Image (cartoon, rainbow, N blue to C red):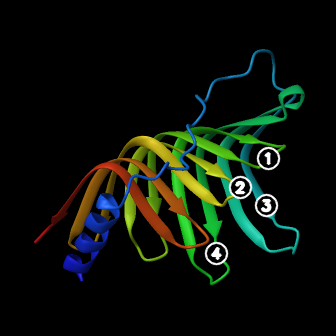
């Protein structure tokens, strides 16, 4: 199984160079001025036009800035749902939710678990709500069972349940 994964990773890495559709996370910075609303231990869910829940967000603290249509979050957990019942869990120290786009940016000690129990760690991620992709430009460390990979830049297609490392990919089998 590990050899198959290695071949898939290497095959993907040597395919013709494609322009990655990675988005660069915006720096999570406090907007100027006072928050219009501040809440502790907050939960928020997003459902699509068919009334299917696509994600949940929980944070220890949230500050809403009405004029920026932005929510600043601290110590957050994001759960992304797939139509087949698969669940992605992501955590991070701080982040923001754009109320207009429903896009999420998280920074600081990001940890993630995919539906197949693949785990990853990085410094930041952006979630594009329309495309349903998670991206980062940072270094990423991925583990599953006795297999580990590392690389720089990552795209997770939530709809396809596919993780792609973009550059400097190294794979090892842990015994």
Circle 1 SS class? loop
What SS does tag 2 mark? loop
SS category of the residue bearing label 3: strand
User: Camera-side residue: 55 or 173?
Assistant: 173
Residue carrying label 3: 46
Q: CA distance from mark 1 to mark 4?
A: 19 Å
CB atoms of marks 1 and 2 within 8 Å:
yes
Q: Is residue 171 left or right of residue 162?
A: left
Q: Earlier in the sequence, mark 3 or mark 4?
A: 3
Q: CA gap, disc 3 to disc 1? A: 11 Å
Which of these two is toward me, 146 or 163?
163
3D distance between C-alphas at marks 3 and 4: 13 Å
Give the CA distance from mark 4 to mark 2. 13 Å
Residue at 77% x, 49% y is 102
- How crowded pointer 3 is (Cα within 10 Å; few <14, some 14-19, many 20+) is rated as some
Where is 4 relative to 49, above or below? below
Marks 2 and 3 in Cβ contact (< 8 Å): yes
Q: Which residue is identified by label 4?
A: 82
Q: Which residue is mark 2?
A: 129
């Amino acid at each position: 199984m590990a050899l198959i994964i290695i071949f898939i990773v290497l095959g993907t890495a040597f395919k013709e160079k494609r322009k990655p559709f990675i988005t660069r996370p915006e720096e999570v910075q406090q907007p100027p001025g006072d928050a219009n609303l501040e809440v502790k231990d907050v939960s928020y869910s997003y459902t699509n036009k068919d009334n299917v829940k696509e994600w949940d967000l929980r944070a220890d603290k949230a500050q809403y800035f009405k004029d920026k249509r932005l929510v600043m979050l601290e110590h957050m957990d994001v759960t992304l749902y797939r139509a087949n019942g698969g669940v992605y869990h992501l955590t991070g120290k701080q982040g923001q939710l754009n109320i207009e786009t429903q896009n999420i940016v998280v920074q600081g000690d990001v940890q993630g678990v995919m539906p197949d129990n693949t785990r990853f760690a990085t410094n930041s991620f952006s979630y594009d709500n329309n495309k349903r992709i998670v991206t980062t430009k940072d270094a990423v460390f991925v583990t599953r069972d006795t297999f580990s990979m590392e690389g720089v830049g990552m795209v997770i297609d939530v709809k396809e349940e596919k993780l792609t490392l973009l550059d400097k990919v190294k794979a090892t089998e842990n015994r």
